[in-house]
């Protein structure tokens, strides 16, 4: 079967490109012909470009506008690092930028994974393309795989009864809270599915690992969301690193490549994060970690995953002080991951018949 994937593949974000790569490779291992539909979503494109009047206008307050202008060079460096990974690792279709020119050459369109229904990620609105609202061949099908969204977006969809579900032949979501909320308005049975970075065989990461970090002793801090006091997790991470005599690596997309991201997490002594995908790769590699709840309506995907693998104790509140590095029970995690991986693969394979 020929499959086109619609996701946030152009986002200059480690998790976005890695989940896209993982879904591509998983489907290829299942024997399918796969392309990433090169849909250039307007908001995603604008926030990651070096400069955008549209994004500048959305920034509230003079201080935020000045900060955006100040960070232009950082965005340029980040774009350069991510474009290399996309070019060499993702199989892209011809570029398209509206629902009217989505390629018509696929048997199946898979929408997902990532936060495609989250208004936070789309400038405060929804994009109908990620609801399957585009022209496609009559005999083709649209599948939603492990789509994620925040609580605020869930509430909007439910209160407005937005008709998200009619275009899909099958649909899975990443959060159990979303499934519960949508039961009353969905015309489809909704399944829980894991992020593609956990769905794929772990061997796909081997070719991306940079082994120069193997013999270094360090703590990793990676944030994509911040508590109100933006230096709080930095201070906690630094204290832990000093306690053990380790260096502290702060993961910034302007400094480290996509390959560095997974390599640094693989060889770390401990990961401190508020990021879903830093949590994911800590689980994949068995790296000790603490994932901080920020109580901003976006913690559910971390909590759901950690509960499924038996590591909910690693989801900690912002007041928590990490005073020691506690090893993971890798055997238990792998066993639990295998159970949910099997269920998610069954969803995909049954949807692609």
Image (cartoon, grey):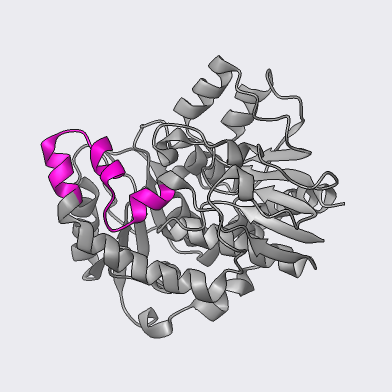
Q: Is any atom of residue 145 visible in this view?
A: yes
Up/down of 234 relative to 18, above or below: above
Residue 87 position, x and y percent, is 50, 73
Q: Which residues are magenta?
A: 44-68
Q: Is any atom of residue 269 visible in this view?
A: no
Residue at the location (28% across, 58% down)? 50
Residue at the location (74% across, 58% down)? 3
Residue 49 position, x and y percent, is 33, 56
Residue 34 position, x and y percent, is 71, 64
The quarter of the displayed image where residue 264 is located: bottom left
Q: Nearer the viewer, residue 235 or 164?
A: 164
Instruction: Locate residue 253 relative to residue 2 in the image: left or right.
Output: left
Residue at the location (73% across, 68% down)? 28
Magenta span: predominant SS is: helix
The quarter of the displayed image where residue 48 is located: bottom left
Residue at the location (84% across, 49% down)? 350
């Amino acid at each position: 079967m020929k499959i086109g994937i619609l996701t946030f593949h152009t986002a200059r974000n480690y998790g976005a490109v890695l989940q896209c790569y993982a879904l591509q490779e998983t489907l290829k291992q299942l024997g399918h012909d796969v392309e990433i539909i090169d849909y250039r979503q307007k908001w995603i494109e604008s926030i990651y470009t070096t400069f955008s009047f549209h994004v500048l206008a959305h920034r509230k307050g003079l201080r935020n506008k000045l900060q955006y202008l100040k960070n232009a060079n950082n965005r340029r460096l980040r774009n350069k690092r991510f474009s290399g990974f996309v070019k060499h690792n993702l199989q892209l279709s011809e570029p398209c930028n509206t629902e009217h020119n989505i390629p018509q050459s696929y048997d199946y369109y898979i929408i997902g994974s990532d936060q495609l229904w989250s208004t936070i990620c789309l400038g405060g609105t929804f994009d109908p393309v990620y609801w399957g609202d585009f022209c496609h061949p009559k005999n083709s099908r649209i599948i939603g795989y492990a789509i994620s969204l925040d609580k605020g977006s869930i509430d909007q969809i439910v209160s407005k009864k937005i008709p998200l579900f009619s275009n899909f032949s099958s649909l899975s979501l990443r959060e159990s809270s979303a499934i519960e909320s949508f039961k009353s308005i969905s015309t489809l049975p909704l399944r829980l599915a894991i992020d593609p970075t956990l769905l794929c065989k772990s061997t796909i990461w081997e070719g991306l690992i940079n082994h120069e970090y193997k013999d270094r002793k360090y703590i990793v801090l990676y944030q994509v969301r911040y508590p109100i006091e933006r230096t709080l997790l930095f201070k906690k991470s630094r204290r832990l690193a000093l306690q053990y005599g380790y260096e502290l690596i702060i993961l910034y997309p302007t400094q480290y490549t996509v390959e560095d991201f997974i390599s640094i997490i693989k060889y770390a002594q401990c990961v401190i994060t508020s990021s879903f995908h830093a949590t994911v790769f800590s689980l994949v590699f068995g790296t000790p970690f603490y994932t901080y709840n920020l109580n901003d309506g976006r913690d559910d995907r971390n909590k759901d995953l950690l509960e499924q693998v038996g590591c909910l104790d690693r989801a900690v509140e912002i007041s928590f002080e990490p005073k020691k590095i506690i090893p993971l029970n890798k055997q238990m995690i792998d066993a639990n991951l295998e159970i949910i991986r099997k269920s998610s693969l069954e969803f995909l394979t049954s949807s692609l018949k």
